[in-house]
Image (cartoon, helix red, strand yellow):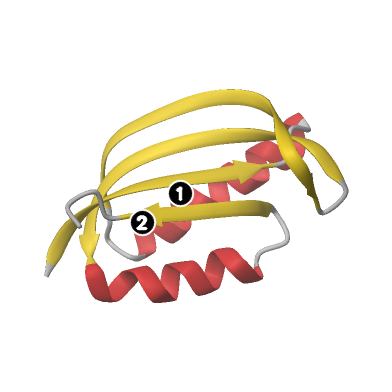
Amino acid sequence: MIQNYEFTVILYQDEDKFKEGYDFVKSVLENAKAEIKKEEDLGVKTLGYPIMKQDKGHYVYFELSADGQSIAPMSRELQLSPVVLKYLFVNPER
């Protein structure tokens, strides 16, 4: 069943690592056939606590539609990726 999700990802602030992470995230979303409705680059922000020895991260926010069954496999790919610091899927309808 197709549902709406808000998805925020924190990537490395370094320009090259950011580009690599951003391309990876987009490919994961495309492979899962998620339809991106809105995308917003929130820029570099100071993290509340260090993640993988990083004090700052580059935030990107997405609003998307995806099959609820595809969220778990996407989460698994993102979790195992060395180019993604943190991510969060939220279903605003719940």
Q: Please, what is the three-letter code of the amino acid marked with disc 2? A: Glu
Query: Could you classify mark 1 by the number of other residues whose Cα lies within 10 Å: few (under 14), some (14-19), or many (20 or more)?
Result: few
Left-right relation of 64 to 71: left
Cα separation between marks 1 and 2 = 6 Å
Q: Is residue 90 above or below residue 44?
A: below
- Reply above or below: 85 against 28: above
Q: Is residue 60 above or below residue 7?
A: above
| Residue drawn where x is 47% and y is 44% of the image | 8
The residue that disc 2 covers is 30
Which mark is on residue 26?
1
| x then y, percent, for residue 44 | 66, 25
**Which element type, helix, strand or loop, lies under badge 1?**
helix
Residue at (28%, 56%) from the top-left corner? 34
Q: Which quadrant would the N terminus be assigned to in this image?
A: bottom left
Residue 39 location, x and y as percent? Answer: 37, 32
Q: Which mark is residue 90?
A: none
Q: How would you rate the neighbour count of disc 2 (Cα within 10 Å): few for under 14, some for 14-19, many for 20 or more?
A: few
List the single residue furthest toward the right: 53
**Pointers 1 and 2 in contact (CB under 8 A)?**
yes
User: Residue 80's image quarter?
Assistant: bottom right
Question: Could you say which is closer to the camera, residue 28 or residue 58?
Answer: 58
Residue lying at 49% horizontally and 26% vertically, measured from the top left:
41
Q: In the picture, residue 32 is in which quadrant? A: bottom left
Total labels drawn? 2
Residue nearest the viewer, comparing 59 with 35:
59
Mark 2 element type:
helix
Residue with the most extreme left position: 1
Question: Which residue shows up at 20% across the image and 57% down it?
Answer: 94
Tell me the kind of residue under disc 1.
Lys
Query: Is 8 located above or below residue 80 in the figure?
Result: above
Residue 43: give x, y in percent of width and height. Answer: 59, 23
